[in-house]
Image (tube, rainbow, N blue to C red):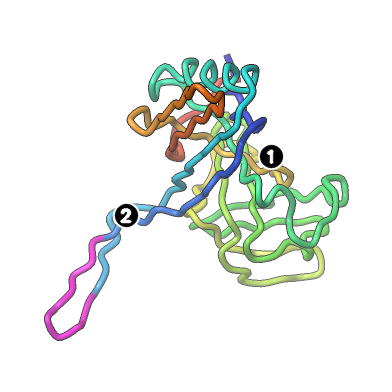
């Protein structure tokens, strides 16, 4: 079955943190240097509070369907549902020309996209990626070139760009799940999840 989107009813906070896999050497003299151990990935922390019984059951059922970390889910960044310069989802219909060595080229009215915007793609082969525009490298009349964080892999097949509620695939970290059922009925749930890295293919 296809992956589902995480519940947002009752969601109080959803923190997206880019996690870097690096080792840093610090000397007594204050010098240091970092060694890359792999590409960065998103870690998200979701907190739900003051849930109604219906909301509470919806979130606990969602967590149960994850089967620990076996079944991934889609998540978008609630604080950045649209690019900063685009007031509605139908204002633009950009598309990806190509992704090479982490550089994404996007066309069709994309001059309104800016650093910090979230974009995602799902390739025709089913691979899904979400990232933040980290740096605008160039801007022409009808296209831009940009780097993403995390690193944008070159997809297999034609990618379908998403700028509204740009969603990626995540796996639950079961050890982070916390469920509170107090007598005052102020129900609360929290959990963390890690971005799924390629070459995982989302079920259709």
Measured from the top left, where is residue 20 in percent x and y?
36, 56
Q: In the rendered image of this protein, does residue 108 appear above or below residue 5?
A: below
Residue found farthest to the left: 28
Under circle 1, the secondary element is: strand
Query: Is 3 placed above or below 144 here?
Result: above
| Residue 58 shown in magenta | no
User: Which residue shows up at 51% across the image and 49% down it?
Assistant: 16
Which numbered mark, 2 or 1, is in the foreground of this view? 2
Of labels 2 and 1, earlier in sequence is: 2
Q: Secondary structure at mark 2?
A: strand
Position in image of residue 27 (x %, y %)? 14, 78
User: Residue at point 77% right, 51% down?
Assistant: 94
Residue 166: quarter of image: top right
Residue at x 56%, y 44% (from the top left corner):
14
Identity of the residue drawn at 56% across and 64% down:
134
Q: Any mark on residue 21, and which? A: 2
Residue 132: name its quadrant. bottom right
* Residue 98 picture location, percent across and down: 63, 52
x and y percentages locating residue 11 in the rendered image = 61, 36
Please provide the residue range marked out in magenta: 23-32
- Indicate left or right for 6 with 93 as reference: left
The answer to whether residue 24 is magenta is yes
Question: Label 1: how many residues lie within 10 Å, few (<14), some (14-19) or many (20+)?
Answer: some
Instruction: Report how far apart the C-alphas of labels 2 and 1 lie in the structure.
Output: 28 Å
Examine the rendered structure and indicate whether residue 109 appears above or below residue 34. above
| Residue matched to label 1 | 160
């Amino acid at each position: 079955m296809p992956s589902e989107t995480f519940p947002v009813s009752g969601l109080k906070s959803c923190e997206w943190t880019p996690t870097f896999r690096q080792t840093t050497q610090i000397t007594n003299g204050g010098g240091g240097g970092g060694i890359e151990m792999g590409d960065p990935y998103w870690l998200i922390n979701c907190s739900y509070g003051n849930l109604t019984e219906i909301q509470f059951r919806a979130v606990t059922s969602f967590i149960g369907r994850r089967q620990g970390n076996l079944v991934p889910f889609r998540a978008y960044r609630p604080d950045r549902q649209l690019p900063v310069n685009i007031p509605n989802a139908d204002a633009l219909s950009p598309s990806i020309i190509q992704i090479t060595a982490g550089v994404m080229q996007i066309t069709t009215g994309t001059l309104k996209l800016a650093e910090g915007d979230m974009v995602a793609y799902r390739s025709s082969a089913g691979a899904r990626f979400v990232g933040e525009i980290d740096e605008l490298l160039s801007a022409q009349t009808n296209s831009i070139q940009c780097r993403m964080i995390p690193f944008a892999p070159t997809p297999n097949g034609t990618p379908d760009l998403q700028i509204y509620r740009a969603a990626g695939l995540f796996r639950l970290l079961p050890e982070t799940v916390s469920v509170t059922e107090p007598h005052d009925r102020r129900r609360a749930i929290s959990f963390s999840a890690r971005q799924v890295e390629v070459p995982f293919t989302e079920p259709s």
